[in-house]
Image (spheres, rainbow, N blue to C red):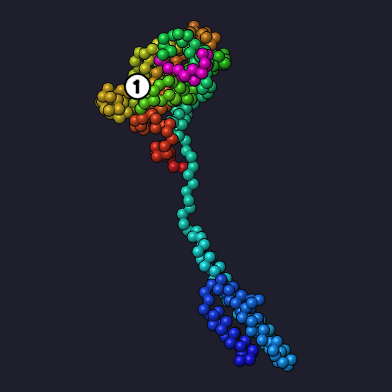
Amino acid sequence: MDIIEQLKALEKEMHDQLSQLTDLDGVKQLRIDYLGKKGALTQTLRGMKDLSNEERPKVGAFANELKTKLAAALDQKEEKFQAEALEAALAAETIDVSLPGQEVQLGKPHIIAQVMSDIETLFVSMGYEVVEGPEIESDYYNFQRMNLPENHPARDMQDTFYVNKDVLLRTHTSPVQARTMDQHDFSKGPLKMISPGKVYRRDDDDATHSHQFHQIEGLVVAENVGLADLKGTLEVFAQHMFGADREIRLRPSYFPFTEPSVEIDISCFKCGGKGCNICKQSGWIEILGGGVVHPNVLEMSGVDSERYTGFAFGIGPDRVAMLKYGIEDIRHFYQNDLRFLTQFQEKG
Ligand code: PHE
């Protein structure tokens, strides 16, 4: 068979194979097999050296043309496969703009923060200022200025974490009130303040005790204020937090920094006073402590206790939140379990 025939057979053979290809790799391989350095075309053209001078240019021209034709056929096939691949990729990557977006999870205020800010807003609306102070406090401000000298037995009421003999983690936010009284200029008007924040006590942690918890203490110092003002103020607080028909009652108690001192109960918001598991069948729930500021406490801040009197109270936001939301264990607040925390987060 002469070379031209061989080349024609080669062309047909390559076209047959080309028609059966299914992907780009196949085209690549076929190009190597037929047009590569060691490919079928080169092999076939080896026979040219035996041709006559007349025949050789004809065969050469035919071979060149064939090479161009085969390359074009391969290119065409390659483009077809590339276009198909692109189309498939575009189809797979289609974005459905009608699908709902992914919801972004935003942090929300902790339940205790919510309750505290609710209480703060209430007192601010009654003209109180909000004052914060250090959590690492001196024995002097935490105890001595609260009428608790060294070795006073009532210090045991607030089991204390001491840093050293004179420095401690504050056991209540009362020292903020002493600090504020020191600064206050009574010629410009009465002092009305609340001091919110964390406090620490060496309690064993259980369902109702935590070594760290929160307080919002309040203090009013002015002329002619007393127990009746305390009662009226806390009635407003109780009704705001636990419902408009709440009543309060005062029971005698003892705190070194107030005289007289009282424990304050609210009528049970669940049973309305009939007796239930929340109020332990008594109809009343103990909710805070308070009293008339002891003259010693005023005098230590340089306040004339003949002229000025004051009342003070201590609210436990942890306990308020537990009662309000029916939470039976204080430790839930501090374990950061999202299953618990997200129950109290309004959407928005
Ligand atoms: N400081 C008191 C406590 O932590 C609470 C309190 C404040 C009581 C003001 C009476 C008056 O226990």
Q: Which residues are magenta?
A: 157-172
Q: How many marks?
A: 1
Q: Residue furthest front?
A: 50
Q: Residue 239, how many percent across, how many down?
A: 38, 27
Instruction: Give the side of residue 41 with respect to residue 278, left or right.
Output: right
Instruction: Give the side of residue 304 with respect to residue 39, left or right.
Output: left
Question: Which class describes the residues within 10 Å of circle 1: few (<14), some (14-19), or many (20+)?
Answer: some
Q: Quadrant of the N terminus?
A: bottom right
Asked whether 163 falls inside the magenta stretch, the response is yes
Residue at 52 percent across and 16 percent down: it is 164
Residue at 56 percent across and 84 percent down: it is 13
Secondary structure state at the residue bearing disc 1: strand
Q: Closest to the observer: 179 or 20?
A: 20
Residue 267's place in the image compared with 107, above or below, is: above
Quarter occupied by residue 81 = bottom right
Q: Residue 183, how many percent across, how many down?
A: 57, 16
Q: Is residue 189 visible?
A: no
Tag 1 residue: 286
Residue at 55 percent across and 14 percent down: it is 182
Residue 313's place in the image compared with 84, above or below, is: above
Q: Main secondary structure of the magenta part?
A: loop
Residue 258's place in the image compared with 198, above or below, is: above
Asked whether 171 falls inside the magenta stretch, the response is yes
Q: Is residue 166 visible?
A: yes
Q: Closest to the observer: 296 or 55?
A: 55
Instruction: Give the side of residue 201 with respect to residue 21, left or right.
Output: left
- Inspect the image, locate mark 1, and give the three-letter code of the amino acid beneath it: Glu
Q: Residue 2, how many percent across, how many down?
A: 63, 91
Q: Closest to the observer: 346 or 337?
A: 337
